[in-house]
Image (cartoon, grey):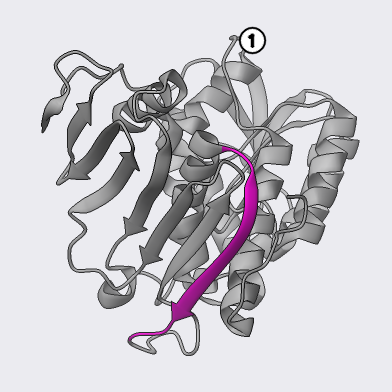
Amino acid sequence: MFRLALVGAAHIHTPGFVKRILAREDVSVDYVYDHDSARATANAEQLGAAVVDDPTTIWDDPEIAAVVICSETDRHEELVRAAATAGKHMFVEKPLGMGAEDAYSMAEAIEAAGVLFQTGYFRRGTPVELFLKQQIEAGAFGKITRVRHTNCHSGSLGGWFDSDWRWMADPAQSGCGAFGDLGTHSLDILLWWLGDVSRVTADIDVATERYGDCDEFGEGLIKFASGTIGSLAAGWVDVAHPVGIIVSGTEGHAHVDNGKLYFKSQNVEGADGGEWTKLPPAQPHAFDLFLDAVAGKDVTLVGAREAALRSAVMEAMYEAAEKQTWLTPVGC
């Protein structure tokens, strides 16, 4: 049994994390901190924890092994640095930073502290994404020419960010709008699959103006060092999202249509372009992997430097969209 604290409860995924904690028998939550006292109290009541009005109580308690940071993004750096100084393992909800500068600064602090780190890139654990990574690495597609990964929902249309999660549609607090919020998951998968980035560009826009000038959809392009052209789309204004993945190469092709994978490869027996169901098992959710790691299990987590790179690339996409040009992200 280990003890942790919830430090910030602003993110829309916080309720899901609370449920995951309550479903386990190897962890207890002692403290909840949030600058919004009502939010802190509501989560503390569910977790059977004490509310603290100053996170110093958490940093100073040697019995607290880890913290879950779900604050607004613009509050991440202060909290992450304090957690690192205190030697606390940490789960920090994505995106790690507002941009390259604060994200790389946090990564350096985390690495220097030698603590466990994880962020919420849960798509790495899905059977389709795992399978396609395996096939990319095995050369099933030959030379990969283009890859597309998208992540869209109807959040703006449904008013998801009208009240409790309003800060997520305020780029001053979140660092981004819809394109960055959902697109960071697609970006993570593309970089996880294909590696080093050469340059990026994007076009990002507003559809409903429900949240003022906060962006609601966008398309990005990535030129990878390998020569592959990657594209990603993300938005809060989609009424349907049937085709989420395309991988095209000189010797193979794959796409996902309404959750079903279709796979063709001259290098894989039986891969004739029809539906492919021979997939690896799903991995635990990224948050559960973090709790498993703190509990002492040997699992693979997202590195702090990986998370920082994604903030840097996304920042470059937003800047490229504004300037209508191509840019090389910081750190690439």
Q: Let me know if residue 176 appears in the view.
A: yes
Residue 186, image x, y percentages = 44, 50
Which one is in front, 276 or 215? 276
Residue 318 picture location, percent across and down: 59, 72
Q: Residue at x 75, y 27 (%)?
A: 64
What residue do we see at 46% from left, 58% from top? 183
- Amino acid at the residue labelled 1: Gly
- Please determine whether, in this image, residue 254 is positioned above or below residue 63: below
- Secondary-structure class at tag 1: loop
Q: 62 left or right of 70?
A: right
Q: Is residue 104 left or right of residue 182?
A: right
Q: In the shown orientation, is residue 44 left or right of residue 162? A: right
Q: Which residue is mark 1?
A: 296
Q: Is residue 157 above or below residue 297?
A: below
> Which image quadrant for residue 138?
top left
**Front-most of 126 and 40?**
126
Quadrant in the rendering for residue 99: bottom right
